[in-house]
Image: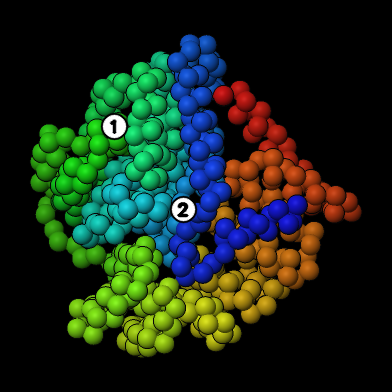
Amino acid sequence: MIREARSLATVFKFNPSDWICFEGSFLNKVFVAFIALCYSFILAAATNDLPSIGSSSSRALSLVDEQLVGDDYMRQIRAMAPMVIDAEINDYIQHLGFKLVENNPDAKDRKFSFFVLRDNSINAFALPGGYIGVHTGLITKTENESELAAVLGHEVAHVTQRHLARRLELQNQMTIPSLAAFAAAILVASQASTSETTMGALLGAQGLTQQAMLNHSRSNEAEADRIGISTLYKAGFEPSGVVSFFEKMQENQRYYSSAFEFLRTHPLSRSRITDARLRASEYPQRKVASSPRYLLMKAKMQALTERITPVTIKKHHEDYRKGNIKTEAELYGHAIFLIRAKEFDPAEKILKQLAASNAQSSYTIALAELDIERKTPAKSILAIRGLLTKSPGNQALVEILARLFLANNNYAEARTLLLENIHMAEYAPFLLKLLSQAQDGAGFKSEVFETEGNFLLAMGNLSGARAQFEQALNLHTDDPYARTRINAQINEIKEYIRQRSLRH
Ligand SMILES: [Zn+2]
């Protein structure tokens, strides 16, 4: 079992050339299987005798059921989609997302989670249960933070207004399986362009007409725009961010085929842009500077998604020499690119200059990343520890310190650090992967199975998770507390599988 789990660890291997996301050839296989699964969902949706989730008298999802469905999708997305695992970028997007959540009065008592998918197109989407996905292209192609916040505010409104759940209510034939297909369509949309037409053809063949989806979407879009602009304003951003973003979307729309139009989560019409412009003009106009975090994370995202080739490396050096790379964010992005290109000396020089002039934790984290690459992790431990003392629980700092410890063979320290901070694993399952490495290295073999189980559970591998928990149970014969905890996990999986079989 451990060996099998370790093979998964290779997917999580952190090295600068792929430190932002986990994806691999196995994903492609799973993806093909998933397409087949979606196809069967769509076929199933065409029949009338499907069981609906929750109360049989209502087609609408209860909040509890919506959360279950959302959790299910999220596990599938974690398993299949190229998620960005960079802790700093995830920290930032969660932070910005929650700034908007706090300013939406309907968002109280709702759960939210923001994540980033590696995809160059400009898009974002909301899933049931408050899961909001942001494409890397949205981060890199927004002009300023208000534009990015505008999209998040809009997505938060889709969740608070329960648009996916309400769509189910309105369209009787749209039962849960086709909602699964809908989510699948979003996933397809974030894959290679060849998939677009495949999925479009599949959906078209099943008679799910574009118009029916779009009609409902348009009223939902108008509502999400209205609430989103108000949230954006209350959160301290520029309401006009919505308008400039829409204009960008319209520009981008030209590149998509008509089949893809159906898959788009936010159909955009000329009247929608006009409405948004009118609505934004009702608020006092103001100029709001983007935060340094936004500028740095955008630069990091750009540097992490750029291809490393002799040509791009040469261009980076030329631009630097000519003085075209001059702002702090540009210099930082340039240094991140250089680390990925394994040009450590110039990267270090730039990062040290930046760190000397400005105490941004990003510079210290990048220097730590560089030390891991150079196999001198001990050099950065003190600096990162110092930052973590000032910002306890900061996910990016916990993650980089754990990796420094692991690279320096300080397994016991890594284990203690991660166990203290593992409550964040809900948002970052890769922390569990680091924990299992630490437990293994520190000689806590009995803990490894439980951690691997929790990791596989978060990644949607229910049977794998259950097998790991059962192994853990075998090793904990004399610890009643551990047995109770692990048994609860196994029972939860059994219940989850039962629910899923009822739904599908
Ligand atoms: Zn929308």
Q: Residue furthest front?
A: 310
Q: Residue furthest right?
A: 478
Q: Which residue is drawn at 26% across and 43% down?
A: 228
Circles 2 and 1, Cβ within 8 Å, touching? The answer is: no
Mark 2 closeness class: few <14, some 14–19, many ≥20 residues within 10 Å? many
Instruction: Name the one closer to the observer, 503 or 240.
Output: 503
Q: In the rendered view, would you say 209 is above or below 83?
A: above
**Within 8 Å: ligand 1 and the Cβ of disc 1?**
no
Residue 454 placement, left or right of 252: right
Q: Quadrant of residue 287?
A: bottom left
Residue 480 placement, left or right of 111: right
Q: Position of residue 443 (x, y in %)?
A: 78, 69
Q: Residue at x 31, y 71 (%)?
A: 312
Residue 467 visible? The answer is yes
For disc 1, the marked residue is 259
Q: Which residue is drawn at 36% across and 27% down?
A: 201
Q: Which residue lies furthest to the top in this view?
A: 48
Mark 1 closeness class: few <14, some 14–19, many ≥20 residues within 10 Å? some
Instruction: Using the numbered discs, state the Cα–Cα distance from disc 2 to disc 1 in whole angstroms.
Output: 25 Å
Q: In the rendered view, would you say 383 is above or below 313?
A: below
Among the two numbered marks 2 and 1 on one chain, the one whose residue lies closer to the N terminus: 2
Residue 60 visible? The answer is no
For disc 2, the marked residue is 83
